[in-house]
Amino acid sequence: MGSTDRIKNVAARVAKWHDAGHQIVVVPSAMSGETNRLIGLAKEIMEQPDPRELDMIASTGEQVSVGLLAMALLAIGKDAVSYTGWQAGIRTDSAFTKARIQSIDDTRVRADLDAGKIVIITGFQGMDEEGNISTLGRGGSDTSAVAIAAALKADECLIYTDVDGVYTTDPRVVDEARRLEKITFEEMLELASLGSKVLQTRSVEFAGNYQVPTRVLSSLTNPLMPLEEEAKSGTLISFEEETNMEQAVISGIAFTRDEAKITVLGVPDKPGVAFHILGPVSDANIEVDMIIQNQSVDGKTDFTFTVSRGDYQRAMAVLEAQRDELGYTRIVGDAKVSKVSAVGVGMRSHVGVASQMFRTLAEEGINIMMISTSEIKISVLIDEKYMELAVRALHKAFDLEKA
Ligand code: ASP
Ligand code: MG
């Protein structure tokens, strides 16, 4: 929601659903740019803001949104009431700035719904056991919405966002990218954790754990568009795999541009090596993604792993500092690499997906530096300058273009 006009639009959309006889809970995010602004203010005072106080500040954006939206509904004659996360019974742990929802006491909300009210609850936040305000991490209002839908056993959780659904790949990279009408929850989870910014990863985990039918759809359509049309728009995250043969083997090509790889050369090949390399990296709160350890030659081995590019310098520094303990010959790194992944539940029942992927990249002359796989995903690490080419070639090779 970027302006009060947009808030009035949201109110009109919500009223449309309510008029059709649905009970509605709305979970808005802060107004556009607001959370960034609040975090910016905090950083002007404290470079590394105290997490509890940061949550105190960052959570306020949503409080403004819910009040405004409730008023916009009251102004058009709808009975609406707004609550903060804690008023609505959302209990989290105390991991400030990345708290997890532990329980939701929906008594108050249910009573309002039964009385015919539209209930509006702040996304992104809750309260811990000691009564401190907590936030759920950036993009956390998605998770709030799915969690509230789960607690209320809602028929569907609709996530209105600035894209009109989940695509076979990023349409900014591939013109022929196509919106998927349905995607399985597992595929969505892979896409979210691979950096597709459509939904917060944790919200997808929640949807999966509680089997919440969740639909991603556009907030930019005309709020008065016919309800039947809107109800079928976007992409539905489903829990069943299509068994029909028409189902594409691959549902999407995902990528993360900003990766970096680090190789520790000539470490002794003995128990504890991986632990001693990655332990300090993880202690520095750096997430490691792909990992390879080579066959050892003369009792020495090389160990390569990837981190996100933003953590590259820090990860290198951590390893430099461990030089004596680790006893390596040298560390080399490359911060200009990207990861490209093919995702699809169809991989389970089809062979040859990996070889098709490698053939396609070979035909484009793209060198693969690392490979990792899961049951429904194959990822490769490549030079960043070939990333877009790889995505386009794979999108075509797996027949994902518009019909
Ligand atoms: N307002 C929060 C953020 O900007 C939560 C959200 O938008 O989902 O991260
Ligand atoms: Mg969001």
Image (spheres, rainbow, N blue to C red):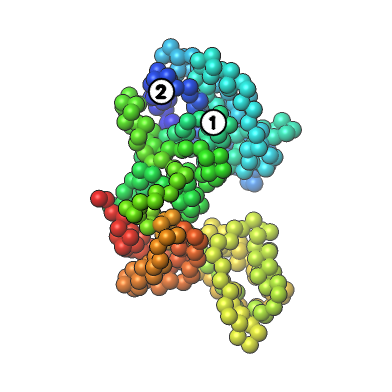
**Residue 316 placement: quadrant:** bottom right
Whichever of callouts 2 and 1 sits on the residue coming sooner in the sequence is 2
Residue at image position (65%, 60%) is 282
Q: How many marks?
A: 2
Q: Residues within 10 Å of mark 1 (few under 14, many from 20)?
A: some
**Closer to us: mark 2 or mark 1?**
1
| Picture residue at 33% right of the left edge, 46% below the top | 179
Compare residues 11 and 258 and report the one nearer the observer: 11
Residue 362: where, in percent of width, then height? 35, 73
Element at badge 1? loop
Snapshot quadrant of residue 354 = bottom left
Q: Is residue 46 above or below residue 253?
A: above
Amino acid at the residue labelled 2: Trp
* Residue 246 x, y percent position in the rendering: 32, 53
**Residue occupied by mark 1:** 153
Local SS, label 2: helix
- The quarter of the displayed image where residue 343 is located: bottom left
Q: Which quadrant, please, contains the N terminus?
A: top left
Q: Position of residue 50 (x, y in %)?
A: 68, 42
